[in-house]
Amino acid sequence: MIEIFEKDCGITFSVRVVPRASTSEIVGEMDGTVKVRVSSPPVDGAANAELIKLFAKTLGVGKNAVEIVSGQSSKTKRIRITGVTADQFQSAIG
């Protein structure tokens, strides 16, 4: 089960990123984190930008509502999304 922390007007959760995939997609759950594949390489923040774009599009929020809180240079990251509840997140990612 994905560990989602709901606070004030948003959620925080962990993500495991696999860069250089054929397509960008949210794969599912892995050890309490969301597993995500992104097509961009982990160079000059391209994979992070793709990750933000993917979550914004999937959840129907602006890119400025999605923030990488920690792990900018790691495969495991903490993401904060404002304007979304845990229930909305769960239903959007399946």
Image: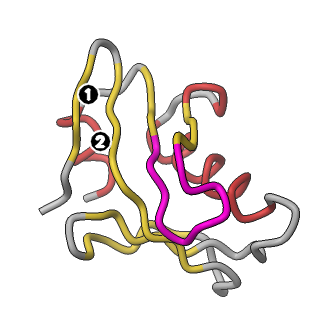
Is residue 82 shown in magenta? no
x and y, in percent, of residue 11 in the image: 32, 32
Q: Residue furthest top?
A: 8
Disc marking residue 9: none
* Residue denoted by label 2: 89
Q: Residue at x 17, y 36 (%)?
A: 87
Query: SS for tag 2?
Result: helix
Q: Name the residue type under label 1.
A: Thr
Separation of disc 1 and disc 2 at Cα? 6 Å
Instruction: Name the foreground residue: 6 vs 85.
Output: 6
Compared to residue 94, the image places residue 82 above or below, namely above
Which image quarter is the C terminus in? bottom left
Query: SS for tag 1?
Result: loop
Instruction: Name the foreground residue: 70 vs 27.
Output: 70
Are discs 1 and 2 less than 8 Å apart at CB?
yes
Disc marking residue 85: 1
Q: Determine whether, in the image, residue 36 is placed left or right of residue 5.
A: right
x and y, in percent, of residue 46 in the image: 80, 62
Q: Residue at x 32, y 55 (%)?
A: 93
Tell me the magenta residue range: 70-79
x and y, in percent, of residue 68 in the image: 57, 43
> Badge 2: few (under 14), some or many (20 or more) residues near its Cα, within 10 Å?
some
Is residue 77 shown in magenta? yes
Q: Determine whether, in the image, residue 53 is placed left or right of residue 70.
A: right
Compared to residue 60, the image places residue 43 above or below, namely below
Q: Name the residue type under label 2.
A: Phe
